[in-house]
Image (cartoon, rainbow, N blue to C red):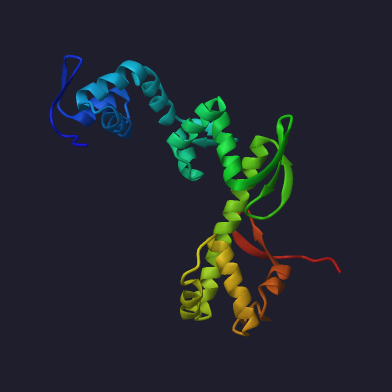
């Protein structure tokens, strides 16, 4: 949809379509879809959306761009929350319509289903299984989001660790051959790649004077420190 030519809406002249849509908080895609579906002009489509949705869309856009506290964390805008959890505003709003929930309840629900296999709901709690670590929990919405954040952080640390090993052990060509044609969770592909390398006897690295030929042996000795994202030595009893 062209956005630069002059346009007149409800008798008011705008220098561009974009200027008009921005002022009234109307989405380009909604207007385009309406034009195609009902075979109307751009002016008719915009006037329809301003008349029916202008005020609510404008309020919604203000909410999206305003500072917000979510699960105990302060964000510069609600958009930053959506970006963090890789969710789109349109997806949350469709969920709202489908479930008749409020926006934030829908946001919680979308984060929950993105990160967990939901078993059932018990009062204000949810029985669920984490898609990242495989753990099964009974969580409140806030605790579910917090655990998902921790798992996502561990996942990013683990991916970085695997990538460092691939480079340091000169396994780049082997990984390219292994990953070719495969799809799925990237961390899971990396994990299975190293199992294959272990079975082929190609995994060997030394940390603080100790040689490791198995990642399981390494993880028995080290764990992730959530404060700085680094691996720290475990202090096993006995």
- Who's the residue at 50% across and 27% down the image? 97
Instruction: Give the residue furthest to the front.
Output: 38
Q: Is residue 35 left or right of residue 175?
A: left
Q: Is residue 228 visible?
A: no
Quarter of the figure that contains the C terminus: bottom right
Viewer-nearest residue: 60 or 204: 60
Give how far across and how far down residue 231 sits, in percent. Answer: 63, 64
- Who's the residue at 46% across and 72% down the image? 180
Q: Is residue 97 left or right of residue 44?
A: right
Q: Is residue 27 visible?
A: yes
Viewer-nearest residue: 48 or 84: 48
Q: Is residue 29 left or right of residue 169?
A: left
Instruction: Give the residue furthest to the top.
Output: 11
Give how far across and how far down residue 237 sits, in percent. Answer: 84, 66
Viewer-nearest residue: 143 or 230: 143
Give how far across and how far down residue 137 sits, in percent. Answer: 73, 45
Name which quarter of the figure residue 10 lies in: top left
**How many numbered marks appear?**
0
Give how far across and how far down residue 203 sits, in percent. Answer: 61, 81
């Amino acid at each position: 949809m062209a956005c630069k030519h002059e346009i007149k809406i409800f008798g008011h002249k705008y220098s561009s379509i974009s200027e008009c849509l921005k002022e009234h908080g109307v989405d380009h895609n909604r207007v385009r879809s309406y034009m195609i579906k009902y075979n109307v002009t751009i002016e008719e489509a915009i006037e329809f959306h301003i008349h029916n949705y202008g005020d609510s869309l404008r309020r919604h856009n203000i909410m999206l761009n305003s500072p917000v506290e979510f699960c105990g964390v302060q964000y510069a805008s609600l958009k930053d929350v959506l970006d963090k959890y890789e969710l789109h505003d349109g997806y949350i709003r469709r969920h709202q319509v489908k479930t008749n929930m409020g926006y934030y309840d829908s946001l919680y629900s979308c984060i929950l289903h993105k990160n967990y296999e939901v078993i059932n709901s018990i009062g204000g709690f949810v029985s669920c299984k984490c898609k990242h670590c495989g753990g099964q929990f009974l969580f409140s919405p806030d605790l579910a989001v917090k655990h998902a954040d921790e798992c996502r952080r561990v996942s990013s640390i683990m991916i970085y660790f695997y990538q460092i090993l691939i480079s340091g052990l000169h396994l780049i060509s082997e990984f390219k051959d292994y990953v070719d044609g495969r799809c799925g969770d990237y961390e899971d592909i990396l994990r299975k790649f190293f199992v294959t390398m272990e079975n082929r006897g190609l995994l060997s690295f030394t940390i603080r004077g100790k040689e490791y030929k198995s990642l399981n042996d390494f993880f028995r000795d080290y764990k992730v420190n959530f404060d700085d994202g680094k691996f720290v030595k475990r202090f096993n009893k006995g």
